[in-house]
Amino acid sequence: MKRYEANAIEAKWQRIWREQHAFEVANPAPGNAEGAKSYVLEQLPYPSGTLHMGHMLPYTIGDVVTRFRARNGLHVLHPQGFDSFGLPAENAAIREGGHPREITERNIAHIRASMRRVGWAYDWTRELSTHEPEYYRWQQWQFLKFHERGLAYRKGAPVKWCPLDQTVLANEQVHDGRCERCGTEVESRLMEQWFFRITDYAQALLDDLETVDWPESIKARQRNWIGRSEGAEILFRIDELDVDVPVFTTRPDTLYGATFFVLAPEHELVARIESDEVRDYVRRAAVKKTEERAAAVEKTGVITGLHAVNPVNGESLPVYVADYVLTDYGTGAIMAVPAHDQRDFDFASAFELPVRHVVRPPDVDVDERAAYVEHTEGEVLVNSAEFDGLPAPEGGRRIVEKLAADGRGRFAINYRLRDWGFSRQRYWGCPIPVVYCEGCGIVPVKEDDLPVLLPDVEDYKPKGRPPLAQAEDWVNVACPRCGGPAKRETETMDTFVDSSWYFLRYCDARNDTAPFDRAAVDYWNPIDLYIGGVDHATMHMIYARFWVKVLNDLGLLGFREPFARFYSNGWVTTGKTKMSKRAGNVVGPDDFVERYGADACRLNILFLGPADQDIEWTETSVEGMTRFVRRMWRVVNEVAEVAPTGAPAGGPLSRKAHWAIAKVSDDIGRRFAFNTAIAAVMELVNELSREPAGPDSLFAAETVVSLIQPYAPHVAEELWEHLGRERLWEAPWPVADPELLEVDTVEVVVQVNGRVRERLRVPPDTPDDELVELARASERVQSYLDGGEAARTIVVPGKLVSFVT
RNA sequence: GCCGGGGUGGCGGAACGGGUGAGACGCGCCUGCCUUAAAAGCAGGUGUCCCUCAGGGGACGUGUGGGUUCGACUCCCACCCCCGGCACCA
């Protein structure tokens, strides 16, 4: 028997697949988009130095599904590429010298080689990297379309600024007041920024979640993130400034309980207030870190001397400036109802402001000195003039209706989602194709002049202005509109823009006249199975959904959602921490593949546990997997030598094989239970090893090899050859024979009063009454029935007979 | 606080619309075979406790406490613990 040599076998088959273009797939000819397709995709990897085990999981899942679906006759698109712009390469260039491009391309070459070594079945002809001008040219083109529509705009806004990375961050990139990337505390700065108008799509992003097949947890995260709340917008008059100030509230029913009014320190009106105390307070609030502002126990604020008029009763409320009111949620101003809002109550306590209860629960005495913030069935309005006695929800509605009649209020919906700030003051990203002209203002670059190539610069270190500002020859251009002197935009795009459409480009990756051909994109999309981690649930996966909706509105493609089904893989952990380069706990596959072979590693990562839960990395388990692969190798080879050929006899081993076919097909095809499918094949191998020379052994061996192929494609291909067959990667997936799935005898359990007292071996189709008779005939059952009769008898055909006395 | 996920052997995990005896499969561990020895491999064992005429038999066991049911890891109620998301969001 030949020795099992993983490395040689794997190199051989990888070479063959490559020569045979085994996993390359063509787009359908125009008008001939027949045949079922499947688009399987894993989230675009960032090309850091090397792959690690955390990458093994999603890619191997994708690969198993790809190979399984291909053998089931589907036309499967499974591409791969690189999210190759971004800060890590730029920071490495600053740290170690060299150009971010060289660093990135070196990393890509390494990772691509690792990926090929693991044997993942990608169509490499469609590979893309987002830093290539062939790619970002079309991103710039799409930006121009967004800009034309007013969906990309520039505005001054307070932004999150990371002082270490010297760049603006998106809200999503700030966690607990710290930069998601480097952990530095984030500052607030007022800056001109580019934004995408994603808030226009807030409702659609929420509604269309109903149409996709994702885990509930991921949908819940997006719903949290979008944060829709229903309420009202109400205008308060401030006579001293001669303005009407809108506030958003979810509690219009408490309007009569408003006893003061608060503006956020950054509110535009605050600058108009002539008061040293106010100016001083605003200055101090501005330097507070986001974190300490949120963590502040004591409410702070300052009185302004202004008064806001409550539109419902004409009361004059004192106006405060306080930093517990956020500038970028709602309108940045609130009506304060201390009786029914804990925060307002805390502020009122600190400033000794009156508390007036206007909602009262039924049959309970409330402490009027405390806040009542709960909701109780049957609560009614009090102290609310003509609305007294109304149930609170109805009272709220009626109050808004009354205000609406006077033009002082309206029903309103507010979202937590903010517009997507996407400009970055860094070098290694996609240039934003606009120029600033002294005469014309912001002027988009002409389509024909794309791409705006990223120029080389001397120094990547940002020094208050973006690195691109150094490239003076590049910066200074003629205005595309008037020809006068103009300067290019020196900021670059957030890399989440790059990953918002890469899956579309794969469908037509070499197109040099458009981002993609609509027919190709419409054929392959939406993605049938998108695989990735939860950490992209709110950023990438919301942005990409937004992007697709816009492209749909622009008529560039024919669908509204990119990811029809999402499989969220767990994290690979060591101890309790997620394996990542940043955590410094990575174990690379290169090493393990070298030592144990790609097949054992692929099997191992999927056998460790359910792939949608976190998986603790252990080194011993991969040894167990090697043992299984060798055992399979030995058993199948033995069968190839000693088993008789010819049709299988339909004995127990055949039945077991058909059971395994059904189990594995269901586990991969429907349940995505990759670990139990492996267990089923192991069971079959165990049974086969007891009977290598039987009449059903050859069939069982073929089944083993065929079923394990999606997981361990190299050794499967080699063993397939030993069994005298060829080209397993394109062989039809086996189908279980329903007749052989039927067992010839089943064990039927007899219970007396819920306890198992006897077991019967009977044919599966034994009629109920016969079962009962057999059961009753048993001596053991008789002894438990104690001669008496059962009061009730329950029969589950093929399963059990239950007597209740 | 709101939302989502989860608690099963020494360990990772099975049991997928309530229907047998929970614990498949693997890791680890134990015993035996092979070997000068080791590794590898092979065969067997392995939830806990108790009884045993040695054939086996019994009780208890899926976070806790109740409930529904002939029957519950699975359904219902209450609670405890762990992980994650959102959060001065009006």
Image (cartoon, coloured by chain):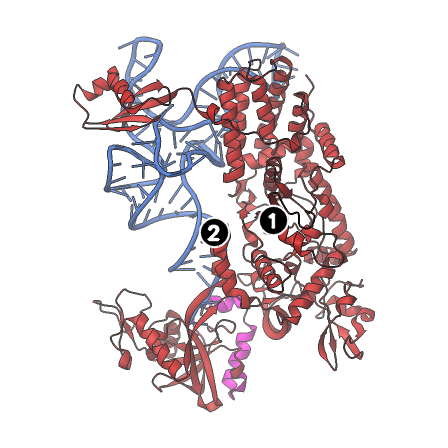
**Prevalent SS, magenta region:** helix
Q: Rate crowding at label 2 as few (under 14), some (14 to 19) or many (20 or more) other CA atoms within 10 Å.
A: few
Which residue occupies the foreground of this view, A188 or A401? A401
Foreground disc of the pair 1, 2: 2
Query: Position of A48 compared to B78: left or right?
Result: right
Task: Give the mark, 1 or 2, whose residue is nearer the N terminus.
Answer: 2
Question: Considering the numbered disc 1 on the image, is that residue within a helix, a strand or a loop?
Answer: loop
Q: Which chain can be seen in red?
A: A
**Whole-percent x, y for residue A28 in the image:** 68, 47
Report the disc number at residue A583.
Answer: 1
Question: Considering the numbered disc 2 on the image, is that residue within a helix, a strand or a loop?
Answer: helix
On whether disc 1 and disc 2 are found on a single subunit, the reply is yes
Q: Which chain can be seen in blue?
A: B
Quarter of the image holding residue A742? top left
Which residue occupies the foreground of this view, A39 or A268? A39
Residue at image position (44%, 81%) is A320
* Residue topped by disc 2: A217
Q: Which residues are magenta?
A: A270-299
Q: Of the residues shown, which amino acid type is indicated by label 1? A: Ala
**Whole-percent x, y for residue A607 in the image:** 55, 34
Residues marked 1 and 2 touching at CB (< 8 Å): no
Measured along the vertical axis of the image, is residue A571 above or below residue A483?
A: above
User: Quadrant of the image for the C terminus of chain A?
Assistant: top left
**Whole-percent x, y for residue A56 in the image:** 62, 41
Residue at image position (51%, 67%) is A292
Query: Position of A460 compared to A319: left or right?
Result: right
* Chain at tag 1: A
